[in-house]
Each structure stands twice: as C-alpha cells, then as structure tokens.
Amino acid sequence: MHVNTSVNPRVQVIVKIYNAIALVAKNIASMDAAFAAAMASVKLEIANLQMIAEIALVIDLVAQRIALMDAAIANVVHQVKKLFHFTFTLMGVSWEESVAYSINAIYLLFSAYLVFVMQIGFAMICAGSVRAKNAMNIMLTNVVDAVVGSISFYLFGFAFAYGTSNPFIGTDLFALAHIPNATYDYAFFLYQWAFAIAVTGITSGSIAERTQFSAYLVFSFFLSGFVYPVVVHWLWSSSGWLSPSSTHLLLGSGAIDFAGSGVVHLVGAVAGLWGSIIEGPRAGRFDAFGRPVTLRGHSAPLVVLGTFLLWFGWFGFNSGSFDKILVAYPGTSDQGNWTSVGRTAVTTTLAGSTAGIVTLFGRRLLVGHWDAMDVCNGLLGGFVAITSGCSVVEPWAAILCGFVSAWVLIGLNIVALKLNYDDPLEAAQLHGGCGTWGLLFTGLFAKEEFVIQVYNCGEIGVTRPYGLLLGGGWGLIGAQVIEILTIFGWVSVTMGPIFYALHKLEILRIPYDEEVNGLDISSHGGYAYAQENNYLRLHGDYMPIQHSLS
C-alpha cells in the first residue's frame, strides 16, 4: 500500500509507524518460513537418526544370536570330542593314533594288492617264455603256486616267519592264532603272503617244460610253508639272528635286505637251481656235442606285458615294505617314511631302467640284433638287484646298481650255456645272480642317514654301520656276505633233498615222449591255443599214440 505524504504531519507519522510495522511483519514472516524450513530439516535428521538406531539395534540382536549359536556349536564340538576321546581311550589309542593306524593299514593293503598283481606278471612272462605246447601247464603251475602257497603260509609259514621264541624260527601264531595283536594284523599277513607265493613262482620258472604236475604241489607247499619262512624269520623278524632290527645286531649291523633280494629272490633261485640240475636240460636243448640249441618262447607280447605288470607291482614290493607310511622323523618338519617311500620308488625305477638299457646294447653287441625278451629280463634283473638296498641308497647309486646287474645277468647266461645248464626263464641267473649282487651292492653303498631313518625311525644321535665305499666300515658288508652264504646253504640242504627224493621216486620229470609232445596235450587235456588239423588237439588224440609207443 502507498500512502500520500502531503497530508498533515500526524498522518505522516502514523504512516511511517504503519510502514515500519509492515516491514517488521514482513521480516517476521520471512523468519517464520526459515524457521519452518530449519525445523523440517531437523525433523528429517532426527528421523534418520532413529532409523540408524533401529538398524544398530537389529545388528546388535543378530550379533547376540550369532554369539549364542557359536557357543552352542562349540559346546556340541566339545561334547563330540569328549565322546571320541572317551571311545578311543577305551580302545587304548587316541584319535590321532587311530587315524594313523587306519592310513597305515590302507597303505599296506594297497601294497599287498600291488604285489599280488605281480603274480599276473609272472604268469604272462612264464607263458610267453615257454613253447606254445606247454603254455597251459605253466599257467596252471602259477595258479597252483598261489593257492597252495596260501594254505601252507596260513597254516605254518607265517608262524615260522614271525612267531616269537628264538632267533632261528618262530614257534607260535600257527593258523593266525592270536592275530590281530599288538604287533601284527591281517593286513600284515596278507602282505607277507603275497611275498611267499612269489618265491615259488621263481622256482617254477627254472624247471618249466619238463616237470610233473604233482611235483609242483609238493615243492610249492614245502617251499612256501617252511623253507622261505625260516629265512624271513632270520632277517625280517625283530628276533631273527640276521635282522637289522634285532636287539643283538650281527657284527653291530645286521644284514640289510629291505624288500628281499636275498629273502625272496635268492631263496627262489637256489631252489630252482637245484631242481633244474637234478632234472637236467629239456629234450633238445643241447645237441650231441653239447652245443646249445635255441628253444625260444612262443610269445614276446606276453613277455613284454608281464614285464610291465611286474614293474607296476614292484612299487608295492619295494615301497610297500615300509609297512607304515605315517612315521615322522625327529628333528625335521617335512620328512618321514613318506619321503623314503618316494625315494624307494625312484631308486627302483632307475635301477631297472638302467639295466634294461645296458642289456639292450650289450646283447646287441653279442648277438647282432635287438632282442625284446633279453631287454625284459635285463630290466627285471635291475629290479631284483635294487630290492635289497632300495630304501637306503641314493638315486645315483641305483643307476650303478642297474648297470652292474645287467652285466651280471649277461655273464651268468653265458656261463650257464657253457655248463649245459638249462633254465627256460633264466630264473636262477636273474634272481640268484642279480639278487646276490644286490646284497653286496647294499653293503657297499648304503647311506648312514637313510639306514637310520629306515631302521631307527630317524632317531637323532644313533650311529650304525653303512656302506663300505662311503666310509661305513666292514660291519654291514660282512653281514651281507653271511646272509648270502647262509641262504645258499639253507636252501640247498632243504630243497636239494626234496628234489632228489622226487627224482628217485620218478615223480619229478615227465617221460621223454610226453615232453616232446608237450605237457598241455599229455597232462592237461589239450593245447592252450587252437591248433591246425595236423596237430593233436585233445588228450584223446594223444592217448592212442602213447599206448602204441609203450
């Protein structure tokens, strides 16, 4: 509003007062609007703070619930632990010990299965190394070795090997009485059984193609049930007089034969040696002037297949001989039997591979061609040799072991021919010669650190004799020589008379005409393979000819 100021002075004063009041009112209205806006802003902030407080309250409640759940879970876990601790305390072991026992048992059982696979390898090599007319016979003898060896080792063998009482032979645990116990369980028995039946397979190869089937039953039972277990007791039982784990160590050392270059291979080889000598060579193996006539096996593919199966099984044979894998070595944070198991597999592979290569080129120089069967035997010779010291030597030493074993086998095969000795699978030369070299090799190259790890669980402060060429003295090599001599003598005085008695009773070697026609047709009802029409196919075809010759 605009007021005319030309009127009297009173009116002018009133107008001024009015304008002042209007201005004050306007300012008050502006202040009211600003205050209202401020109050709205304050209310919004208060609302936000209330929401945050509510959220914080919810978070606090959730945290309380989580804490209660954690306490409940912890209580349940504690109660479960107490239950397990109580359970395993009643069993006499802790939770950790029970887990270790379980893993060790699984490891030993798996190793036993690997060793048993070697029976398939033996069967394939034996079948491929003989002539086709005897394939069924040699396959059946491999089955018999396993089944007869199972019964004899169960009834007597395990007791003679691991029973207690004296350093020579065990006298309890017959038929697995009191098994399982604090020392042995069923897994250990199964593993040792797989070794026992391997011994008889070695001997069977030496006397193949000319032995009566009934003779196999006799010597297989006696070898796996008595002769072999006694040697096992000497070297692998803690009470054996040659054992490196005995409380009374021979020469302060005991003989180291970790997986059986002597216990398994030399025992089987010496038994086969006497059997082959007493039986004599196969018909036609040497001519009238004593010159060798080649009687090649009928299937190189079977020999190669068998060799790879044996290679596969040998990892269980050597590495599995630790029995337990969860054993830590004191003074180390990352070493135990698991590292030794790996090293053992490596040395096994290197020794066999080196022997195979050396045999390949060595025989090439001698006979003028590359021979698959010779290479396979050379490879196996390297495995046999390293079996004694596989756990206590460095990888570089394993290569040397394989190199020498190849020449040992080649040289013994030459000597065998010079002496008119006939072994269709070269079993005595391979398992006996290379096994002997393996025992000597261990006495020369065993490393002290590894010896203590294997036989004293890596205990700190322990000293033992070790390889002669590494500065370990004469104790170990002396014990190795004694093992070789005692095994040869023991097997000779036990298996030699057995074979001689079978020979005198005329139940050892088959008649000449049956040998010429083949054991399959004369003893087992027919050939292993389908034959052409001009061959005798069935036992009934063979019998009229046999009667006409008699």
Image (spheres, rainbow, N blue to C red):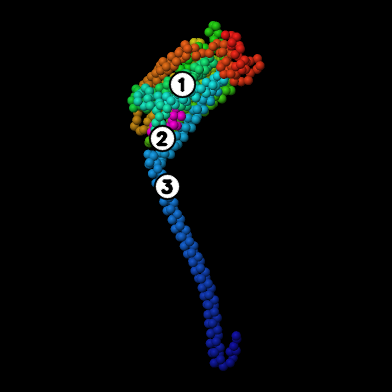
Within the image, what quadrant is residue 139 found in?
A: top right
Residue at image location 59% in from the left, 13% down from the top: 543
Question: Quick one: label 2 or label 1, which is nearer the N terminus?
Answer: 1
- Please state which amino acid type lies under the numbered disc 3: Val
Q: Is residue 490 magenta?
A: no
Which label sits in the foreground, 1 or 3?
Answer: 1
| Residue 80, label in figure | 3
Q: Return the x and y of residue 29 as percentages of the image width and height.
A: 54, 79
Marks 2 and 1 close (CB-CB < 8 Å): no
The residue tagged with tag 2: helix, strand or loop? loop
Residue that sits furthest to the bottom in the current view: 8
Q: CA distance from mark 2 to mark 3?
A: 27 Å
Q: Return the x and y of residue 475 as percentages of the image width and height.
A: 36, 22
Q: Is residue 536 toward the left or the right of residue 146 in the image?
A: right
* Nearer to the camera, 95 or 225: 225
Within the image, what quadrant is residue 244 found in?
A: top left
Magenta region: 182-192
Q: Is residue 290 toward the left or the right of residue 160 in the image?
A: right
Q: Which residue is mark 2?
A: 327
- Please state which amino acid type lies under the numbered disc 1: Phe
The residue tagged with tag 3: helix, strand or loop? helix
Residue at image location 60% in from the left, 86% down from the top: 2
| Residue 221, label in figure | 1
Q: CA distance from mark 1 to mark 3?
A: 51 Å
Q: Return the x and y of residue 230 as percentages of the image width and height.
A: 40, 22
The C terminus sits in image quarter: top right
Residue at image location 35% in from the left, 33% down from the top: 460
Q: Return the x and y of residue 282 as percentages of the image width and height.
A: 53, 12
